[in-house]
Amino acid sequence: MRIITRSEVERLLPVADCVDIMRQAMLVTSRRDVTLPIRQFMPIPDAPGKLAIMPGTLGDPACFGIKLVCKYDRPHGDPLGTHVGMVMLFDSAKGEPLAMIEGSSLTAIRTSAASALATDILARKNATRLAIIGNGEQAMRHVHAMMAVRSIDNITVWGRDAGRSACFAEAVEAATGIPAQSCGSSATAVSGADIICTTTAAKSPVLFGKDLKAGQHVNLVGAAIPTAAEIDDEAVAKGRFYVDYEEAAMAAAGELLGAIERGLVTERHIVGEIGNVIAGSAAGRANDDEITIYKSLGLASQDLAAAHAVWHMAEAEDRGMAIDLLA
């Protein structure tokens, strides 16, 4: 078994390469060649955190495992971040442990790569203007992910803390060389955007349907529980709505569940899973005027596909720490 650290994950799994790994993972997911129990959360007594538990199996490549993630409220900029954990990867044929892989970086990379995949499939081909809502851990990841699938030439950002938003815009421009501007409202940030990524910890909407324009593509990334939502009901209703996994969406996609509860849409508002669009069993964007929305919840199948790729490359290069559990 190999122990693979954050620095090795970052080196072995650049987001541009991970997009194709996610493409295969989503195809396998939509074929249901997976086992994906709905993620569980266990609160930690007398502490501001919880343990997220995500087991699963993947048919191709054949593997299984579990992701354990500690989610704690920490100050902005804390080196631990909000997610600390690991992915345990096993071979399906023998039940042999293959690797323990640092989970925070792997999750961040596969999440932004999954958004890039959805963007590549659903956004207009001539999309060049990006808006990032939020300036936390996933924000910069999504800048680079969007650059992997579209020729981005302008970036606008908005966050609830104006100072942090301005600093983030400066960091984006320094890292990418692309003009980046901090805006005073989410409406201003998205007004001229072709692609919008919401990467917030918001519990209630920060982006509204009245501010969405024809032809935009939206990646909803931050909210992952049924009581949280990054966009309002009007925005949900205005868009062609896609998900990573329907069962998970009907359990935890707060934006969709809220709009269903209040009668604006029904469960049939889901056009399909991204894997269905790739396979051709669900329609993607039909014209340049449609608003498309991808709701990302994150799946164990994505974690396993990314973990297997990292393990395979680490094996080939003899990287990480190889240990014999039976010694």
Image: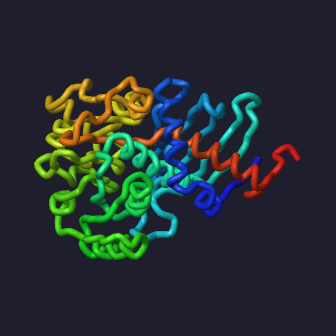
Quadrant in which residue 320 is drawn = bottom right
Q: What is the x, y in percent for residue 229?
A: 26, 46
Side (left or right) of 44 relative to 211 = right
Side (left or right) of 306 relative to 191 = right
Residue 70 visible here: no
Residue lying furthest left: 210
Residue 214 visible here: yes
Q: How is the image coloured?
A: rainbow
Q: How many marks?
A: 0
Residue 179 lies, with reference to residue 290, above or below; the image says below
Residue 171 lies, with reference to residue 47, above or below; the image says below
Residue lying furthest right: 327
Q: What is the x, y in percent for residue 15?
A: 51, 54
Give 229 or 18, whichever is nearer the viewer: 18
Give 30 or 299, whichever is nearer the viewer: 30
Side (left or right) of 234 relative to 9 = left
Quadrant in which residue 190 is drawn = bottom left
Tell me what residue is drawn at x 53 percent, y 49 percent: 18
Tell me what residue is drawn at x 61 percent, y 31 percent: 60
Quadrant in which residue 75 is drawn = bottom left
Give 231 or 277, whichever is nearer the viewer: 277
Q: What is the x, y in percent for residue 23?
A: 49, 39
Tell me what residue is drawn at x 59 percent, y 31 percent: 57
Side (left or right) of 58 relative to 150 = right
Q: What is the x, y in percent for residue 40?
A: 47, 38
